[in-house]
Image (tube, rainbow, N blue to C red):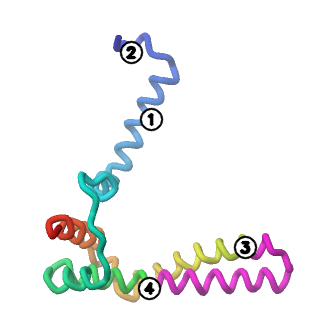
Amino acid sequence: MSETQDQKSFFKRHWEGYKEFWAERFSFLENYSKVLNPEKSLPHWDSSVVEEFIASDPVHGPTLKTAREAAQFGAAGAVVGAVTTAGYCWKYSRSAHGAALAFGFGAVTGTCFGLEIANHWFQLYRLDTMAAQMKFYEWLQNRA
């Protein structure tokens, strides 16, 4: 029952071409397949488990520690951005829905700025943080 190239509709042929095209461009997402679709679920972990990994892996441990510190910049940026934009919006418009939208937009924008500042502050562009996180996930699975 497989259709030949001539029997497929115009849209189906073009959709397959687009699917191949975008699959090539987003092939880096396959790196996350072990995390997004694991064979068995990862065990629960907390900061003590992460500290144990950092101490046990001399290569990826410091990178993971730096990435965790950089995440705090993103969280701080989200808080500052959300509160300031919502505050300005409320001060000048007294609109609850506008303040709520400004709060969300400010949080997203603040997170982006905070992470960008952390990227330069900790020089994350020199480190392979994704590899460190993947090593942590592998270590966590092997540990369980």
Q: Secondary structure at mark 3?
A: helix
Judged by its main secondary structure, the magenta piece is: helix
Q: Residue under circle 2?
A: 5
Residue 121 found in image quarter: bottom left
N-terminal of the pair, mark 4 or mark 3, is 4
Whether residue 139 appears in magenta in the rendering, the answer is no
- Mark seen at residue 72: 4
In screen coordinates, is 76 left or right of 80? left
Q: CA distance from mark 2 to mark 3?
A: 52 Å
Q: Residue under circle 3?
A: 100
In screen coordinates, is 73 left or right of 103? left
Instruction: Examine the rendered structure and indicate whether residue 38 appears above or below residue 3.
Output: below
Residue 120 found in image quarter: bottom left
Proximity of marks 1 and 2: CB atoms separated by less than 8 Å: no
In screen coordinates, is 92 left or right of 48? right
Q: Residue under circle 1?
A: 18
Q: Amino acid at mark 4?
A: Gln
Picture quarter with the N terminus:
top left
Instruction: Look at 27% across and 54% down and name the residue there.
Output: 38
Q: CA distance from mark 1 to mark 2?
A: 16 Å
Instruction: Look at 64% across and 77% down and name the residue there.
Output: 106
Instruction: Look at 51% across and 19% down and name the residue there.
Output: 10
Proximity of marks 1 and 3: CB atoms separated by less than 8 Å: no
Which segment did they paint magenta? Answer: 72-100
N-terminal of the pair, mark 1 or mark 3, is 1
